[in-house]
Image (cartoon, rainbow, N blue to C red):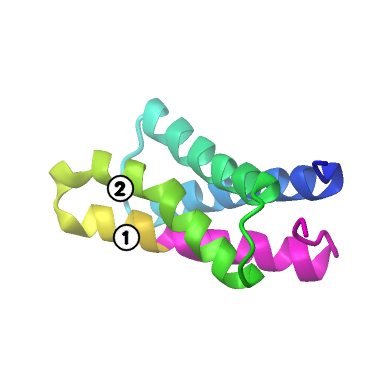
Amino acid sequence: MIYAKRVTITTILGVITGLLCYLGGVHAGIEFTTGLMLATIFNRTFIGFVIGISAIRIHYLLHGILIGALGSITMGVASIDQGLNGLMMITLFGMLWGLLIEGIATKGFKAEMRK
């Protein structure tokens, strides 16, 4: 059984974190093409969705970090031409956003992980 409330909340939080990630990048001076902007927002939305549907049974905060890392590493590898800093920053921020999505969904909205 998929928990519809949880998937909806985590996906919406993914969209929000995607927008925040994009706006933070703009504030940091990153020049976003339309494709990079959409990829950034979609990537964080994807992380939120996967957090919502995942049945991995580990501590909820570790769960968010793990899904955030796994979901971000592909986008990080795509930026490797910018050097290792791009890979590390994208992956680390993915871990942070995953942690926040999971924490807010689980504790803030009481949308617990599947058991």
Q: Is 103 one of the magenta-colored residues? A: yes
Q: Residue 85 is drawn in which quadrant?
A: bottom left
Q: Which residue is mark 2?
A: 76
Q: Secondary structure at mark 1?
A: helix
Q: Secondary structure at mark 2?
A: helix
The answer to which of marks 2 and 1 sits earlier in the sequence is: 2
Structural distance between the alpha carbons of marks 2 and 1: 8 Å
Relative to 93, 108 lies left or right: right
The answer to whether residue 82 is seen in the rendering is yes
Q: Is 111 one of the magenta-colored residues? A: yes
Q: Which residue is mark 1?
A: 89
Q: Residue at x 68, y 68 (%)?
A: 103
Q: Position of residue 16 (x, y in %)?
A: 64, 48
Q: Amino acid at mark 1?
A: Met
Q: Nearer the viewer, residue 101 or 69?
A: 69
Q: Position of residue 71 (x, y in %)?
A: 45, 47
Q: Vertical placement of 48 versus 111: above or below?
A: above
Quadrant location of the N terminus in the rendered image: top right
Contact (Cβ within 8 Å) of mark 2 with mark 1:
yes
Q: Vertical placement of 15 versus 99: above or below?
A: above
Magenta segment boundaries in residue numbering = 93-115
